[in-house]
């Protein structure tokens, strides 16, 4: 379905981004990966996912908090892949502290990586998408893009901002073949959440297993983690013709979190 398209997935060396990259490759999209840490194993897994289609998989290690690095990433995408058709803004970090104790540099980092990076990628991707009259921008927001939790002021502000950016750009592109949407996951068991589970176990003097149950029980009625593969399949749907008029939505996949 996505043969001939190039997908850029930011923050795709682990977790949700990697799951989405694999699902897009399985539909035939060439994929540009990005993120920190080892790139070889993630790259090999995406090549494998797209083997039936012989997809090409590239990598660029841009630090998404740096606008000039994001410009380098787009120069690479243009030169090596001829541009970006599917942009998945997924790179993100978390930091938890009460607002009056929130380290200023952590606030700046959360806002830069979780929100401003999507502004930069969007402004750089849109001209090519408009010229081809086809494009998909998928922003990984969060249940925290729609509701808040204590201790997560920067993350909640950034994710609400990302939902707002999604709606504004969806309106600016509404008469074109470019759609812009957000996915708002509940808990997904990735390194980002594993750190929070371990911190909770530490703080409450309980086992990691009990901390995991506590985390789910507090917010997610299904008591099950959402999986990167499920989010990847939703991204594939958003890339399909059936979603040509899905525009500006913030689609929660949260085991019932927002229904409460
Ligand atoms: P993760 O920690 O597993 O992956 C984050 C990815 O972003 C990694 O590839 C990492 O290398 C990359 N990254 C971090 N800082 C970067 C930077 N400055 N520049 C480039 N890459 C950078 O996290 P995840 O849970 O897969 O989260 C992915 C996205 O989904 C994030 O935006 C997160 O906020 C969002 N999200 C996660 C959950 C969850 O429960 N895990 C829920 C809702 C939303």
Image: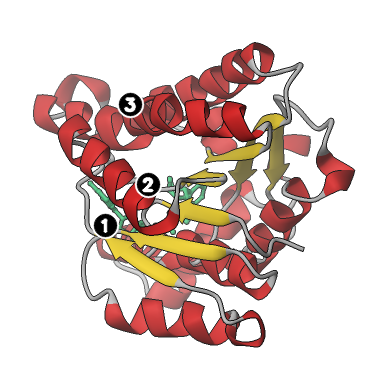
Identify residue for label 3: 116
Q: Nearer the viewer, residue 242 or 210?
A: 242
Residue 146 visible: no
Question: Real-space Cα distance between discs 2 and 1?
Answer: 47 Å
Residue 38 visible: yes
Element marked by disc 3: helix
Q: Quadrant of residue 95?
A: top left
Identify residue for label 2: 78
Q: Which mark is residue 59?
A: none
| Left or right of residue 53, residue 112 in this image | left
Q: Which mark is residue 203?
A: 1
Image coords of residue 194 (percent x, y): 37, 66
Question: Real-space Cα distance between discs 1 and 3?
Answer: 32 Å
Of badges 2 and 1, nearer the viewer stands 2
Q: Nearer the viewer, residue 142 or 196?
A: 142
**Which color mode does the image show?**
secondary structure
Of badges 3 and 2, nearer the viewer stands 2
| Left or right of residue 44, residue 183 in this image | right
Q: Quadrant of residue 155?
A: top left
Q: Residues within 10 Å of mark 3 (few under 14, many from 20)?
A: many
Image coords of residue 62 (percent x, y): 22, 50
Image coords of residue 1 (percent x, y): 77, 63
In the rendered image, the vertical position of residue 18 relative to residue 112, given as above or below: below
Residue at point 60%, 26% (across, down): 130
Residue at point 50%, 61% (across, down): 16
Residue at point 37%, 47% (across, down): 78
- Cβ–Cβ below 8 Å for labels 2 and 1? no
Q: Earlier in the sequence, mark 3 or mark 2?
A: 2
The answer as to whether callout 1 falls within 8 Å of ligand 1 is no
Element marked by disc 1: helix
């Amino acid at each position: 379905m996505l043969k001939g398209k190039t997908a850029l997935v930011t923050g795709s060396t682990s977790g949700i981004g990697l799951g989405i990259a694999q699902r897009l490759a399985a539909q035939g999209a060439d994929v540009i990966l990005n993120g920190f840490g080892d790139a070889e194993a993630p790259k090999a897994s995406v090549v494998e996912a797209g083997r039936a289609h012989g997809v090409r998989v590239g990598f660029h290690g841009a630090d998404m908090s740096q606008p000039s690095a994001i410009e380098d990433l787009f120069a690479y995408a243009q030169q090596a892949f001829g541009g970006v058709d599917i942009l998945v803004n997924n790179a993100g970090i978390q930091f938890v502290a009460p607002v009056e104790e929130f380290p200023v540099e952590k606030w700046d980092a959360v806002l830069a990586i979780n929100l401003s990076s999507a502004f930069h990628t969007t402004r750089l991707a849109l001209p090519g998408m408009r010229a081809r009259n086809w494009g998909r921008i998928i922003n990984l927001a969060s249940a925290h893009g729609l509701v808040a939790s204590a201790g997560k002021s920067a993350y909640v502000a950034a994710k609400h901002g990302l939902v707002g950016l999604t709606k504004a750009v969806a309106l600016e592109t509404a008469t074109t073949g470019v759609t812009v949407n957000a996915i708002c996951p509940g808990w997904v068991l990735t390194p980002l959440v594993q750190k929070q589970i371990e911190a909770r176990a530490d703080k409450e003097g309980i086992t990691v297993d009990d901390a995991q149950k506590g985390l789910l029980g507090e917010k997610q009625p299904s008591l099950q983690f959402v999986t990167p593969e499920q989010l990847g399949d939703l991204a594939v749907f958003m890339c399909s013709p059936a979603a040509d008029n899905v525009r500006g939505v913030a689609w929660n996949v949260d085991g019932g979190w927002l229904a409460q």
